[in-house]
Image (tube, helix red, strand yellow):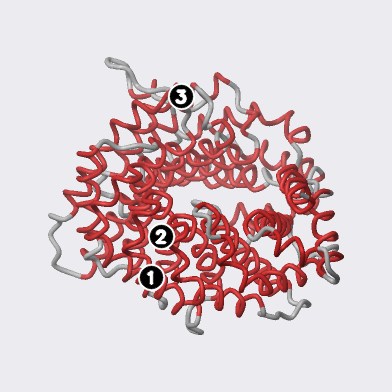
């Protein structure tokens, strides 16, 4: 592999050698270090750019597998060299150095020192020479291939902040303004269409926005009108060919994605901005491109969550596009997103969603019966019944017969348990059914209509029995167990004495005991709590 790296050097074009070396590193782990480091040390400062590039590629290829302890003696010097190589005369070397820094950010981020972060992300101050700028920020202005790898490195950096994004501050905070500004500038480059650079820059920006801490929200709010303005300008793009149309679609999809992320992060919108965004998204729906429609639908869901009951005024205008999305079974990703948006709207509008329920439910029921729809969309559809029922409360009584019949049919689905994919799907399907039951039961109970569920009690009990029989096997995930036991508690609270009478009889008594015990003994604290609550509720 080392000889192949030398022979085939040139912008990570080492053929099979790099993935082969990476796989070896993953398999043999620490042992690979002693064999590869001499090669790296021998060639990393060579005068021939191919040798420098091959050594850089070799280092990047062994970063996944070996432990931090095994790499620790080399990491500081190696990263310093990578930072230096980001200013190499060879584009190929810079390209691979950027890729390698991205791999360090992904697998060994704790090995990066404060001084190295400064060397990589320092913003250029007025009057300073270009070489004073951090190599990653400078790299965003380099050749598209280099800049795209820098975007990946920044994406990996931001990914590591996921657990601290709700904190008052995190490591992204002092970098945020400069990173956001540099990534936005990168998306506007005339050559951003090359090497997937524009997409990579927006993805890095979105991850940075998502995982930024609370102290960046004022800066994030300032981005909203900027991105909205770009989306407005995109409608004025000159379209004379299919390539122009594809470029417009790609840009609009990316901008809708960023607007969704910003809206979600802020958590609320003023009325004027919400109106402006909805007007833009409604305009975007005119595109026949599924990716754009998908992104616009998710952005609308974020607006609904942000404005809550105020979303009611947009529904007459948005309804046709939502229904088109739900009808789009051929492009199942669009349909799946539309189903998710129904849930967002239900949570935002609550009972105000009632005028649209019948049409939405008919479309959802039709999709469940459609064999041409990708099966992975069906569990979220079942769960969506629960969202609707929870929103409209006792008013869901009008739709009980049709939806309960569908839940019973879905509960009878049998799968080949020797096929792990089908077992996973069956678990997701049952979880969706239980989530529907939970929403229906809680919705009816809120308006004192619990007894209306009594005719459908046996169907729910049948499914609980099936799941209890699978307990102790891999067929029942913790999520499924928690959903099932949640329904047991909701049946006790909503149906009351009728459920209690049945629960004391065999075989119901035995399998409910098994199910409740499984939940209480779960390693997951949330499942334990639901199991204990359901046990107390049934016993009362």
User: Exactly how many numbered labels are in the figure?
Assistant: 3
Q: Is residue 36 above or below residue 396?
A: above
Q: Is residue 126 above or below residue 8?
A: above
Q: Does the image show residue 194?
A: yes
The residue depicted at 41 percent of the width and 60 percent of the height is: 342
Label 1 crowd bin: few (<14), some (14–19), many (20+), radius 10 Å: many
State the SS at label 1.
Answer: helix
Look at the numbered discs 1 and 3 and tell me whether their residues touch, using CB distance below 8 Å: no
Q: Residues within 10 Å of mark 3 (few under 14, many from 20)?
A: some
Q: Nearer the viewer, mark 1 or mark 3?
A: 1
Q: Which residue is mark 2?
A: 342
Distance from Cα at disc 2 to Cα at disc 1: 9 Å
Check contact, mark 2 vs mark 1: CB within 8 A. yes
Q: Nearer the viewer, residue 392 or 246?
A: 392
Q: Give the CA distance from mark 1 to mark 3.
A: 40 Å
Quadrant of residue 499 within the rendered picture: bottom right
At mark 2, the secondary structure is helix
Residue count near mark 2 (Cα–Cα under 10 Å), binned few <14, some 14–19, many ≥20: many
User: In which quadrant will I find the N terminus?
Assistant: bottom right
Can you identify the residue that label 3 sits on? 173
Relative to 384, residue 419 above or below: below
Viewer-nearest residue: 181 or 283: 283
Specify the label residue 326 is tagged with. 1
Most foreground residue, 163 or 140: 163
Indicate the position of residue 155 as horizontal and vertical percent values.
49, 41
Q: Residue 387 placed where, x, y %?
A: 49, 58
Name the outermost residue toward the top. Answer: 127
Element type at marker 3? helix
Q: Where is residue 176 drawn, in percent x and y?
A: 41, 28
User: What residue lies at 36% left-to-right and 63% top-to-bottom?
Assistant: 291
**Pointer 2 with pointer 3, Cβ within 8 A:** no
Horizontal and vertical percent for residue 271?
Answer: 23, 39
């Amino acid at each position: 592999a080392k000889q192949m790296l030398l022979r085939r050097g040139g912008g990570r074009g080492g053929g099979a050698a790099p993935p082969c070396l990476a796989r070896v590193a993953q398999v043999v782990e620490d042992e690979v270090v002693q064999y590869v480091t001499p090669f790296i040390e021998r060639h990393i400062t060579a005068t021939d750019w191919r040798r420098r590039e091959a050594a850089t590629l070799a280092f990047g290829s062994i970063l996944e597998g070996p432990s931090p302890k095994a790499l620790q003696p080399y990491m500081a010097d190696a990263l310093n060299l990578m930072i230096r190589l980001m200013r190499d005369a060879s584009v190929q070397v810079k390209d691979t150095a950027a890729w390698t820094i991205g791999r360090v950010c992904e697998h060994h981020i704790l090995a990066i020192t404060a001084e190295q972060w400064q060397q990589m992300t320092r913003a250029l101050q007025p009057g300073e020479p270009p070489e004073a700028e951090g190599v990653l920020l400078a790299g965003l202005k380099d050749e598209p291939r280099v800049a795209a790898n820098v975007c990946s490195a920044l994406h990996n950096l931001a990914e590591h902040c996921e657990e601290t994004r709700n904190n008052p501050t995190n490591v992204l905070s002092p970098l945020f303004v400069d990173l956001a500004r540099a990534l936005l500038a990168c998306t506007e480059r005339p050559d951003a269409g090359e090497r997937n650079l524009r997409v990579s820059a927006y993805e890095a920006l979105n991850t940075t926005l998502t995982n930024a801490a609370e102290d960046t929200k004022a800066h994030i709010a300032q981005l909203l009108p900027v991105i909205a303005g770009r989306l407005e300008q995109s409608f004025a793009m000159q379209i004379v060919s299919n390539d122009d149309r594809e470029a417009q679609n790609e840009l609009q999809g990316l901008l809708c994605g960023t607007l969704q992320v910003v809206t979600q992060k802020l958590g609320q919108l003023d009325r004027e901005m919400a109106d402006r965004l909805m007007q833009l998204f409604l305009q975007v729906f005119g595109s026949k491109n599924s990716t754009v429609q998908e992104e616009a639908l998710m952005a609308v869901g974020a607006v609904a969550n942000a404005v809550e009951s105020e979303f009611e005024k947009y529904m007459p205008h948005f309804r046709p596009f939502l229904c088109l999305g739900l009808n789009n079974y051929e492009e199942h990703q669009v349909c799946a997103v539309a189903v998710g948006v129904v849930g967002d709207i239900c949570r935002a509008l609550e009972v105000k969603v009632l005028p649209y329920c019948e049409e939405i439910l008919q479309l959802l029921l039709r999709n469940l019966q459609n064999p041409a729809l990708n099966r992975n969309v069906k569990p979220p559809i079942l769960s969506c019944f629960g969202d609707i029922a929870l929103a409209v409360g006792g008013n869901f009584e009008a739709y009980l017969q049709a939806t309960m019949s569908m839940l019973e049919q879905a509960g009878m689905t049998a799968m080949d348990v020797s096929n792990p994919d089908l077992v996973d799907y069956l678990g997701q399907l049952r979880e969706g059914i239980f989530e529907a039951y939970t929403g229906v039961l809680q919705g009816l109970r809120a308006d004192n209509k619990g007894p209306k569920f009594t005719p459908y009690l046996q169907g729910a009990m049948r499914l609980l029995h099936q799941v209890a029989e699978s307990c102790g096997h891999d067929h029942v995930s913790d999520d499924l167990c928690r959903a099932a036991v949640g329904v047991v508690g909701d049946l006790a609270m909503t149906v009351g004495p009728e459920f209690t009478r049945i629960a004391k009889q065999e075989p119901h008594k035995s399998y409910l005991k098994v199910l409740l015990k499984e939940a209480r003994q779960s390693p997951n604290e949330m499942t334990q709590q639901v199991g204990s609550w359901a046990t107390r509720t049934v016993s009362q």
